[in-house]
Every structure is written in C-alpha cells, then in structure tokens.
Image (cartoon, helix red, strand yellow):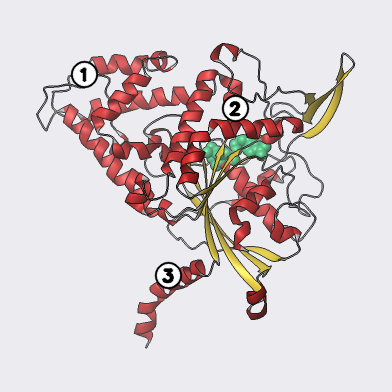
Amino acid sequence: MNKWISRLSPSSTQLNETINRTLDKQVKLAVTGLSRSGKTVFITSLVHQLLHGLEGTHLPFFQMVSSGRLRGTKAMPQPDMHIPSFRYDTAIEQLCGDPPTWPKPTNGISEIRLAIRYLSNNPVLKRVSPVNTLYVDIVDYPGEWLLDLPLLELSYDEWSQQIAHACESEPRLSLSQEWRTFLDTLDLASEINEATLREAAALYTAFLHRCKAPEYGLSLLQPGRFTMPGDDLKGAPILEFCPLLKIPQDINNENSLYFELKKRYEFYKEHLVKKFYTEHLSSFDRQIVLADVLKAFNTSYASFVDMRDAINMVLKSFHYGKSGLINKLFGLKIDKMLFAATKADHVTPNQLPNLERFIQQMLATSHNNATFEGVQTETLALAAVKCTQAAHTTFQEQRISCIKGVPVDSDKPVALFPGEIPLEVPLPEDWVEGRFHFMEFKPPRLANVHGSGLPHIRLDRALEFLVGDKF
Ligand SMILES: Nc1nc2c(ncn2[C@@H]2O[C@H](COP(=O)(O)OP(=O)(O)OP(=O)(O)O)[C@@H](O)[C@H]2O)c(=O)[nH]1
Ligand SMILES: [Mg+2]
C-alpha cells in the first residue's frame, strides 16, 4: 500500500496542480522587463497590496477587493522546487525600513506563491462553495533572456551580419572599437584556442556592458545571457563565443576557430534559449512586461529607439497564436498580456494620459499582432511604489503642476516639473539635451507602513486586468 502511495505521490501532486488550473484555481503570472525596469519593486508592492487587502481602500479598481469579497491572502510554499524563491521578506524589509531603501538588483528567475481566499461571485458556485482559494504563482525573470528568441531563427552567419550592421552606426561603432580591433587580429582558420575564444568573448561582453551603461542606455543587446547570465553561468564556456563582423568564405576545417564559434552559438541556442522556453515560458498564463520608458527619454534618441526595438522584440516572443514561432515550438498559452511603463510617479499626474498614449503608439504593431492572435493586451502607466506627491507652484503668475519627492542622492525634498511627455516620438533633432529630466526618488517614509498597502499608481488596474477575471 505504502509503495503505491509513494509511487503515486508525485503524480498526484501534479494532478492536483492540473485540477487547480482547470477549475481556475491557479494562475501563473510572469513578470518581466529589462534590468532596472522595476520588476522586484513591482512584485513586492503587489504582494504587499494583497496581504493588506482587507485593510483600507487602496485598491479601488481591483473589483474583488473593492467589492468586499476578499477573505485574506497568505504567502505559501511555491510549487516549483527548482526555481529560487522570490525574496519578498528581504525586499519589503528594505522598502519599509527606516530609512526605507530600494531592494538590491536581482538576476535570474525567482518565484512566489500567494493563496487568495475570496467569496465567489458566481451564482451557482456561491451555493456549492461560497469561499474559494485562488493560487497565484508570480515569476520574476529577466527580459534580457527574451531578446534571445530571434536567435532560434538565425544561423550564426546571419546573426553575425545583423550585429555587424548595428555596429556600423554610433554609439555602437565607437563602443565596439576594442573588440573589433581584436577580431581583426584573429586567424579564423587556425586551430581552436580556448584563450583566444575567452578573450574574444570577454571583449564582446565588455562592449555590451558599455552599451548598457547609463550614459548610453542601450537595450538591444544579444546574446541576452552575456549581460544577464543568471547565477550559475558566469565564466562558463557556453558564454565564450561572439559574433563576427566579416564572414569567412573558404574555411571548411571543423577544428578551426570559425567552426568552434559556430558550434558554441548553436550550443547556446539549444541548451540555454530553448531550455528556458520549454522549462518556464510554456507554463505561464498571464504576462506583464515592465519598461522604464522615462529613463530612455532622459538618455538620448538612440537609447529610446533601442529600447523601443528591444521591447517590440520581447513582445514578439509572445506573438502567440497558431502562427507564432514560440507557440509552434513550445505551446505557449498566455491569453492576457499587459505592457506597463513603470515609475509613473516621476511625471506630474496630468502627464499620465500622455505617457499611456505614447506607449500605445510605441507598441502599436506588437499590440495589433497580439490582438490578431486572440491575446487580450493592455497598456498602462503605473508606479508600484509612489514616491512623489502632486504639488503646484507659480511661475510668472501661472499655476504650474509639479511633483514633490526626495531625490535618491539627497535628503531634502524638492518640487519640480520634470517635463512634458510628447504624444508622438520627437524627431532626433528635437531630442535636445535637458529636454527631459525625470529624476529618481527615494522610497517614501510611511508612518502606517504595516497597516495598509504601499502607495501606488494604477497597480489596482494592473491587478484587475491580469487576474480580475479569475475571481
Ligand atoms: N519612483 C519609483 N521608482 C521605482 C519604482 N519601481 C522601481 N523604481 C526604481 O527603479 C529601481 C529598480 O527597481 P527594481 O524593482 O529593483 O528593478 P528590477 O527590474 O528588479 O532590476 P534588476 O533586478 O536589476 O533587473 C529601484 O531601485 C528604484 O530606484 C516606482 O514604482 N517608483
Ligand atoms: Mg530585480
């Protein structure tokens, strides 16, 4: 008997998970975005809001809560033992500390499970089972990893040609100088040499990091794992290759450097890119993509264009439906997708509609494609933790809206008007320095931090869109 039980246990757990999903008792919500886009803060605030759902009125647009049907939320052991846990406790301790601080940067994937108990709204279910539980599994993973999807459709030579083309214009042209000079010294027909491969990869990775640095703020950096390897891959040979700027035509020796570069590229695709999709992406039900659009505004036109292209590329991964590559390969089942511009507390409240219109335009094609495939999509400007207050000032006898908050590098609050969000992308020549000045702020010091959800902007709307229909 015992033998049977122990044999049955793993599959019965799986069976329970399947039943939970079928009866709409479980939903897997994936949160992604490029680094520093606000993933950790978003998840931490979202969990905090739900844990404090019974108190206060901080989620007016999240119907299940605002209509009084919530019966409480609890963090539970996560279902996927092989995924690191999302460190909610550490992050909330920092955000609610005195003084409050931002959580530390994270890398790689992590997960947290919440059990949300609620009163059913369904007239039939209400009688059978008035109180229900929805398990929400929230998964945080780097958006950089999604930039690798297009590689699955490209040969090594084709990918190299794309990178070479991108490196023909600034700022990549100057930033890639050292790596390019090294490539010129290589004899690609020579025998494999580990040290040479390591050096080429190191110089290429350094180039990517330079592109990513705040002063250039470029986002479309491939392969994604070179700048965001995850915990266990730093220094692994699978990351020791790079593209070429000129493709050699007459090398047929399988032991040559050129063949080895090709081999490693294919290995990277097979063992990292495909593995991530099969292990994780295929299990997601709902997806939110976060982007710090305002940071790109601050930096330059090139940074903005790069971010726009990177996000559209990320969204292409979710080009679901029957015709999408990813669906053909991995059977993706995401049916709702939210794209959110984060840190909306960096703009004055009257600029929020502009910010939302702007991102709608920025992603119009992706939005159209996803909707065409039957995926419900939405765009939103939100702040997971609102660090500023709306204020007014008078300038030349005119009343001007501004925001007030404590800048990250100061202890004194400032009031400022950070700039207007244009409704359309400005021309490159109109992107003059100093036009946008969206400042970073410290998290707010709150007296009643454990008594109510953290202050936010439109996080309740995000919740309503992402999981509202599950209650
Ligand atoms: N004002 C404001 N700043 C925010 C908000 N969310 C994030 N930030 C800022 O953005 C920074 C990055 O936020 P994280 O949540 O750590 O971003 P992440 O995407 O998890 O970053 P990585 O783990 O490095 O990939 C924070 O340290 C804050 O400075 C917000 O809602 N409002
Ligand atoms: Mg993080």
Q: Is residue 25 above or below residue 167?
A: below
Tell me the quarter of the picture where residue 301 sits: top right
If the image is split into quadrants, where does the C terminus sit? bottom right
User: Is the CB–ligand 1 distance for label 1 below 8 Å?
Assistant: no
- The answer for how far apart the CA atoms under marks 2 and 3 are is 43 Å
| Residue 413 in sight in this render | no
Q: Is residue 156 above or below residue 47?
A: above
| Residue 195 in sight in this render | yes
- Residue 170: horizontal and vertical position, in percent? 43, 14
| Amino acid type of the residue tagged 3 in the rendering | Gln
Q: Residues within 10 Å of mark 1 (few under 14, many from 20)?
A: few
Taking the image as four quarters, which one is ligand 2 found in? top right
Question: Which residue is labeled 1 in the image?
Answer: 186
- The answer for how far apart the CA atoms under marks 1 and 2 are is 38 Å
| Amino acid type of the residue tagged 2 in the rendering | Lys
Q: Is residue 14 above or below residue 146?
A: below
In the image, what residue occupies the spot 37% across and 21% down? 166
Q: Secondary structure at mark 1?
A: loop
| Amino acid type of the residue tagged 1 in the rendering | Leu
Question: Which residue is labeled 2 in the image?
Answer: 295
Question: Which residue is labeled 3 in the image?
Answer: 14
